């Protein structure tokens, strides 16, 4: 079952915040390297799901170094993004490398907890979370908050790692995730433990059906998911 049963919520939050702080300067480079830049495609596909909401504010939760926030502003010139993350170093690192065009004026970074979102209820047409839900200490609490801040009719988009099921691809992927990735990422980032955590958090995360059931339970009457790239990641969609 989920990691949250093993550690207390506060312990997990501290661990996660510290780990992301320690790799914040290398995060973007390693993402591109380790995914061979396929992560950009995943964020592009996720953001496209919001094409029905080209104006107004979107909340990007667990925004990290702001790659999804940037894609959200790139795809819609009238959209603004409130980017929330509880790791200040990740946000700072993202802000430092924002392109010097007008998009930087449409992204507001806020240091805050996704389990107590610092925003009024029914404020956003869209809430996005890329590779963040797996890191929450209390998944249900986070989903309830995402529901609260969405306007009725608004859309929740969660992009998250899942586990490939194809019998041929699965062992190859597992070898890469458990053996290759922590070594390479450990050498580059200087924090092998952070990438061992990545592998174990993927292994321990919910099955897509279970996360979808939790999204339904959080109040989303319409909900579905879509695997990408042999099921390495899945996009979950909830409509309030
Ligand atoms: C893997 S990074 C994802 C960053 C970015 N969304 C992306 O697409 O690359 C996960 C982020 O979630 C943040 N995070 C984890 N738990 C959080 C929480 N409870 N509240 C806010 N941010 C959280 C971490 O600080 C980290 O920056």
Image (cartoon, rainbow, N blue to C red):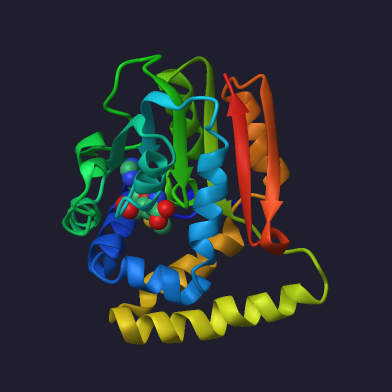
Instruction: Using the rendered image of the protein, determine whether residue 8 is visible from the camera's viewpoint.
Output: no
Foreground pick, 12 / 93: 93
Q: Classify residue 16 by image quadrant.
A: bottom left
What residue appears at the point 57 percent right and 36 percent down from the top-left corner?
A: 49
Q: Is residue 142 above or below residue 201?
A: above
Rendered location of residue 98, percent (x, y):
23, 54
Residue at image position (30%, 39%) is: 83
Q: Is residue 40 above or below residue 240?
A: below
Vertical relation: 53 (above or below) 96: above
Q: Quick one: which residue is furthest to the right in this view?
A: 167
Q: Quadrant of the C terminus?
A: top right
Is 22 above or below relative to 185?
Answer: above
Across and down, in percent, residue 51 comes to: 53, 32
Residue 217 visible in rendering = yes
Decide if residue 138 is on the left or right side of residue 188.
Answer: right
Residue 191 placement (x, y as % from top left): 31, 77
Give left or right: position of 70 versus 168: left
Front-lying residue, 163 or 16? 163
Residue in front for this viewpoint, 93 or 85? 93
Q: Residue at x 59, y 81 (%)?
A: 176
Tell me where residue 179 appears, x and y as whole percent: 55, 85
Please identify the quarter of the rendering in which residue 41 is found.
bottom right
Number of numbered discs on residues: 0
Name the foreground residue: 62 vs 18: 62
């Amino acid at each position: 079952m989920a990691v949250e049963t093993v550690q207390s919520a506060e312990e997990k939050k501290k661990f996660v915040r510290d780990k992301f702080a320690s790799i914040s300067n290398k995060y973007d480079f390693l993402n591109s390297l380790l995914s061979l830049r396929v992560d950009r495609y995943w964020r592009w596909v996720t953001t496209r799901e919001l094409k029905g909401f080209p104006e107004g504010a979107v909340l990007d939760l667990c925004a990290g170094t702001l790659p999804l926030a940037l894609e959200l502003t790139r795809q819609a010139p009238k959209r603004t993004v409130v980017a929330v993350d509880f790791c200040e170093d990740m946000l700072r690192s993202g802000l430092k490398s924002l392109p010097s065009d007008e998009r930087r004026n449409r992204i507001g970074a806020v240091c805050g907890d996704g389990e107590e979102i610092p925003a009024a209820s029914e404020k956003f047409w869209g809430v996005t979370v890329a590779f963040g839900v797996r890191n929450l200490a209390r998944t249900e609490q986070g989903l309830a908050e995402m529901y609260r801040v969405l306007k009725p009719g608004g859309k929740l988009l969660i992009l998250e790692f899942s586990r490939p099921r194809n019998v041929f691809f699965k062992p190859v992927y597992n070898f890469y995730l458990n053996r290759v990735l922590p070594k390479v990422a450990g050498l580059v980032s200087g924090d092998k433990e952070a990438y061992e955590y990545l592998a174990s958090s993927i292994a321990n995360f919910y099955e897509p059906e279970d996360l979808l059931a939790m999204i339904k339970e959080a109040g989303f009457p319409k909900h579905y998911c879509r695997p990408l790239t042999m099921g390495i990641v899945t996009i979950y969609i909830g409509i309030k």
